[in-house]
Image: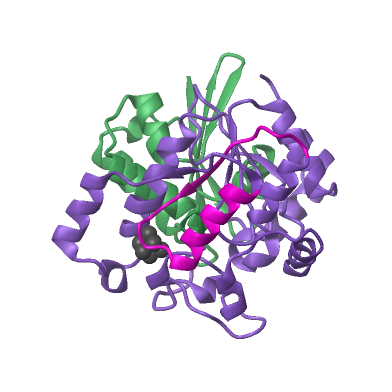
């Protein structure tokens, strides 16, 4: 299927999440919602109102909070969906733990553990799909998510032979809009949110934060902020766009 | 085939870390001579050729790789994929995952 993703991203930039989700579910058969066990649960609720038959997967790193496991099961029952749980390769986790222990991320940074427990299984899963749907929002992290489009080619996981499209239907929604949707539609949610967690990830790497602090501050707080030196400053791209012939 | 590498030049005139690493690696692999053109995207020069190419190809970080062959143009934003597909180089899964994560810091939030 040939889709002009840049054009679609512009066309759908100001549309409701439900319209973006409908586009995604209509256009792709091999598509799945990635559910992290947090506020992205509203994508499942929205999808259930668009069609009965849709796919959802979650990655079980083995280090999630008990409340998150409870929500995963609650969602499965509430929506009557076969929630697929994707696990890391056990031999890779065993090697990591054998060599570096259970808390290597506090010492060596989170990349290695996240690579084994999240990104490798995600890549394996995405290799079976043509598109996926995430709950990423611009307001979650001004430094890394400020410009996420509602639909994009997933450059990280695509190859020349297999393009993977990523839909971010909630990109333009605020946390307040998400919570209004949860309350109005009586969507099951992670009880960690009532305990002060704004961001929900693995138990050892997530903490509560103060009001108005951003998601990044709730995760891997012992590490430096993201290194952004290789990015192009948005203002440069905008100025260039207005002033220079391509 | 024409291969262009767009590298980022910081305001102080030095290369950004990933651009520098990639150029070192191309040297180490003996592939540097197969790159037809290096173009700089200059941090403080929004009209620089590299910034124009980033805009044209909708890319938001350096380095990236443009491969033109006849009428087709392929743009690679991941170095390992470029190495694999253009130069048939073996890349370890550890290196691939590390690069994917470095380019997509949000992935850890999944
Ligand atoms: S968030 Fe922490 S425990 Fe979970 S995969 Fe990443 S480093 Fe490992």
- What's the colour of chain B in the image? green
State which region is magenta: A50-78
Q: Is residue A229 visible?
A: no
Extreme-bottom residue of the structure: A210
Q: Is residue A51 above or below residue B110?
A: above
* Residue A33 horizontal/vertical position (percent): 60, 43
Q: Is residue A165 above or below residue A138?
A: above
Q: Is residue B87 above or below residue B41?
A: above
Left or right of B7, for residue A111:
left
Seen from the viewer's position, the closer of residues A184 and A135 is: A184
Seen from the viewer's position, the closer of residues A159 and A200 is: A200
Q: Is residue A46 above or below residue A26?
A: below
Q: Quadrant of ligand 1?
A: bottom left
Seen from the viewer's position, the closer of residues B84 and A18 is: A18
Extreme-top residue of the structure: B70
Write down the quadrant of residue B44 in the picture. Answer: bottom right
What residue appears at the point 56 percent right and 82 percent down from the top-left corner? A209
What residue appears at the point 58 percent right and 66 percent down from the top-left corner? A190
- What's the colour of chain A in the image? purple
What residue appears at the point 74 percent right and 50 percent down from the top-left corner? A240
> Would residue A37 be counted in the magenta stretch?
no
Left or right of A91, for residue A219:
right
Q: How is the image coloured?
A: by chain
> Would residue A59 be counted in the magenta stretch?
yes
Left or right of A94, for residue A221:
right
């Amino acid at each position: 299927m040939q889709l002009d993703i840049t054009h679609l991203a512009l066309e759908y930039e100001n549309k409701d999440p439900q319209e973006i989700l409908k586009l995604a579910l209509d256009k792709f058969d091999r598509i799945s919602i990635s559910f992290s066990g947090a506020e992205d649960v509203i994508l499942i609720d929205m999808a259930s109102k668009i069609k009965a038959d849709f796919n959802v997967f979650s990655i079980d790193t083995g280090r999630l909070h008990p409340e998150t496991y409870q929500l995963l099961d609650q969602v499965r029952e509430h929506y009557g969906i076969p929630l697929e749980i994707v696990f890391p390769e056990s031999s890779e986790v065993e090697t990591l733990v054998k060599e570096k222990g259970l808390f290597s991320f506090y010492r060596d940074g989170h990349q290695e553990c996240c690579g084994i427990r999240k990104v490798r299984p995600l890549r394996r899963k995405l290799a079976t799909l043509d598109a996926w749907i995430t709950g990423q929002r611009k307001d979650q992290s001004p430094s890394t998510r400020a410009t996420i489009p509602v639909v994009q080619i997933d450059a990280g996981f695509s190859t020349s032979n297999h393009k993977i499209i990523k839909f971010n239907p909630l990109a333009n929604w605020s946390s307040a809009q998400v919570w209004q949707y949860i309350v109005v539609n009586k969507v099951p949610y992670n009880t960690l949110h009532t305990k002060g967690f704004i961001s929900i990830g693995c138990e050892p790497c997530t903490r509560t934060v103060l009001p108005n602090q951003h998601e990044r501050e709730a995760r891997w707080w012992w590490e430096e902020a993201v290194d952004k030196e290789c990015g192009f400053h948005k203002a440069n791209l905008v100025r260039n766009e207005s002033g220079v012939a391509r | 085939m024409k291969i262009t590498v767009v590298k980022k030049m910081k305001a102080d005139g030095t290369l950004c870390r990933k651009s520098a690493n990639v150029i070192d690696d191309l040297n180490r692999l003996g592939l540097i001579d197969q790159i037809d053109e290096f173009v700089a995207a200059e941090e403080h020069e929004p009209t620089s050729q590299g910034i124009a190419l980033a805009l044209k190809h909708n890319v938001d970080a350096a380095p990236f790789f443009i491969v033109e062959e006849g009428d087709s143009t392929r743009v690679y934003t991941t170095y390992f994929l470029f190495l694999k597909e253009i130069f048939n180089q073996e890349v370890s899964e550890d290196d691939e995952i590390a690069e994917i994560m470095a380019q997509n810091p949000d992935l850890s939030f999944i």
